[in-house]
Amino acid sequence: MAELQPLFETKQAKGRAAFKVFTATVFAGICLMLVYRFLHIPRGGEEGRLTWIGMFIAEVLFSFYWIITQSARWNVTHNFPFIRRLSQRYEDKLPGVDVFVCTADPIMEPPTLVINTVLSVMSFNYPPEKLSVYLSDDGGSEFTFYALLEASHFSKFWIPFCKKFKVAPMSPEAYFSQQPDEKNVIQVEEWLAIKKKYEDMKHRIESIMAKGSISEEVRSQHKGFSEWYNSEVTKQNHQSIVQIIIDGKDTNAVDKEDGRLPTLVYMAREKRPGWPHNFKAGAMNALIRVSSEISNGTIILNVDCDMYANNPDAVREALCFFMDEMRGPEIAFMQHPQRYNNITKNDLYSNCGHAVHQVELAGIGGYDAALYCGTACFHRRESLSGAKYSKDYREHKNSEAKETDERRNVDELEKTSKILASCSYEKDTAWGKEMGLLYGCPVEDVVTGLAVQCRGWKSMYYDPHRRAFIGVAPNTLDIHLVQFKRWSEGLFQIFFSKYCPFIYGHGKIKLGAQMGYCVYLLWAPVSLPTFYYIIVPPLCLLHSISLFPKVSSPWFIPFAYVFIARNVYSIIEALNCDSTLKGWWNLQRMLVIRRTTSFFFAFVDVILKQLGLSQTAFALTAKVVTEDVLKRYDQEVMEFGSSSLMFTIIATLAMLNLFSLVSAIFKMIFQDFGALEKLVFQVILCGLTVLLNIPIYEALFIRKDKGSLPFSVMFKSIAIASLACLIPLN
């Protein structure tokens, strides 16, 4: 019968048996490598004993991490929703959906960027009376409020336009960057008219931002501006502000086609000196409370302010998971992959993570434990409110018990909501501990998802053919590394905390899921063996000290097989995930750079924090850069331009490998060519590292643009690398 058909289905990825056989052969090769390394440790007093032991430890760590990563590939699954079945069965019973958009700084996250995201989620193909959009402004900026007010006026034209022509993407900026369908004369005329309205709105917002003040004439348009009459309102010190800009319950709140509009709410939670605000987690928890008072949607979608909606049916697809009769009641959240609209052809900084999104996260999702990644995620409100899953759970009973009071007017709702957004509300409560997003970790999303799963809930990963949400990726190396440093630091903190998946998740989530979490939680410590491999083998090559078996030795075979097999598989995986060969090569470079900079600094900071010598901080990444930086990014030219410590490390390691390779080749050609047999593996490793670092050498010696590496970095890298080459190895 039709009513018994599932609303979504899960399929296993193809080729699982072949992959398991391949994995077994690589594992056997790794075991033989470790046996060789252990059996050939030099005796006490012999040359290279400590170096050899270091190699053994590094390879043990690499091997352990490789085993961990295989858990994310062992059970890759793909999910497919059936929205037609959903519409046939539940069209008149669709639940309320609350959308959370978070921003924190009007300079780093311009209001025009923010309102494009807001307008996109207001335009979902979903009953507007059941859709509510909340903007959390942690900057407490009147400019962001003004931009949202402008967006509310524009939405009266934009939403009916989107629905009439089935617009996608629903972000005006992204949509108008495309050309209209010239065959449809009516659409072209309306396209030009609506674009003119958008450009006028954008100009007004940018003009006020440039001016730095809002006129009294504009302030008189809405009572909400009275919140900023006090000149003492600052980003870190202001009262709670809640303004219902569009009341979706009001039948008079309609667009130009007399269609209902979704609810639109501005919220800036209270911030006071001395009171912890807990970064994004605190903002999300305030949104959960405020939204429960105003609309109390059963489903919550949270997106970052730079991640606009690209699929009008994204909400309906998500509901297929939550409303499925058999599996739906146990699903806490459904995570979409993070996709970007500014990725270069070969993904210069490997922001896209093709294999991560299409293989690893899908593999972890195969254990019913998809990671919560902080954005583009649909949640069941109950699961975020601390509820534990039980088999007796029934969605309709909970929703009936939590209906909002329809009789209260806007002023009453705003007044009550301000109390829920005050900085003292959470004192001596379970918020941030057992309710809402958890506090105390820079990656509040991942640890919250883990905690929810350990309360009995399951989670799904859904990677649709049409990307549901699209954001903006870092387009400079500096921003990219800062972002990965924050992520890896927070993830490693989880591993050190009571929420370590092997401890906290024991008996609650599957072993494969525990290992899958650790693929990312162990980013930071994997920097140590990487550092060792990038530094020690080149130095030993420089001093003609062999660290690997001779080519003529049978022991050479497992080393060669593991090296070739892993890289060939990695290339095939990348190509199957829509990457390019050069994109794969860029990924190898970025893996080395991340591990020797972002991950290493994250490791050090976490250790210092464990010793009580450091505190958790949150770094906000910029969303805007200059035109010349964008030009170089589009040309796939790496952006440096500063003398940061990270760049000095990158340049020093590049120079060290270059010095070692050149010196070794010189010695072999003019002194002892026979040494190549015992040093060939080190020559290959060092040579590949040099090839990976070609963009670094260009930035050091060839390029003259502002994105090149400064002379100070070149001088320090050459000096440090030269001194390292003089270190005697025993």
Image (cartoon, grey):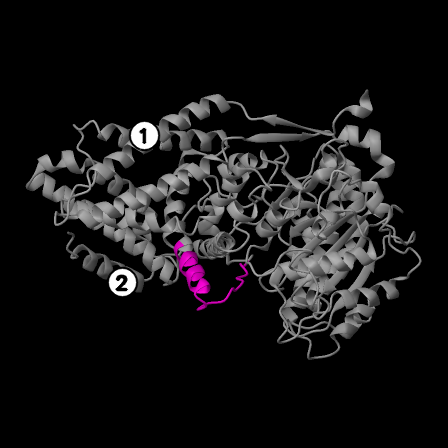
| Circles 2 and 1 in contact, beta carbons < 8 Å | no
Q: Nearer the viewer, mark 2 or mark 1?
A: 1
Q: Which residue is mark 2?
A: 716
| Helix, strand or loop under label 1 | helix
The quadrant holding residue 369 is top right
Image position, residue 588 (x, y; %): 38, 41
Q: Which mark, residue 29?
A: 1
View extreme (left): residue: 671
Mark 1: give few (<14), some (14-19) or many (20+) Cα within 10 Å: many
Instruction: Examine the image and state in which quarter residue 162 appears.
Output: top right
**Can you say whether 568 is above or below 477 in the image?**
above
Asked if the magenta segment contains residue 118, the reply would be no
Q: Quadrant of residue 508?
A: top right
Residue in view at x 63 percent, y 36 percent: 462
Amino acid type of the residue tagged 2 in the rendering? Lys
Q: Is residue 607 magenta?
A: yes
Q: Residue at x 82, y 57 (%)?
A: 294
Q: Residue at x 62, y 46 (%)?
A: 454
The segment highlighted magenta reads: 600-622
Q: Residue 385's x, y, as percent?
A: 72, 53
The answer to whether 341 is drawn above or below residue 88 in the figure is: below
Horizontal side of residue 409 vs 152, given as left or right: right
- Residue 338: image location, x then y, percent: 58, 44
Single out the residue that lies furthest toward the top: 1
Q: Residue reaching furthest bottom?
A: 231
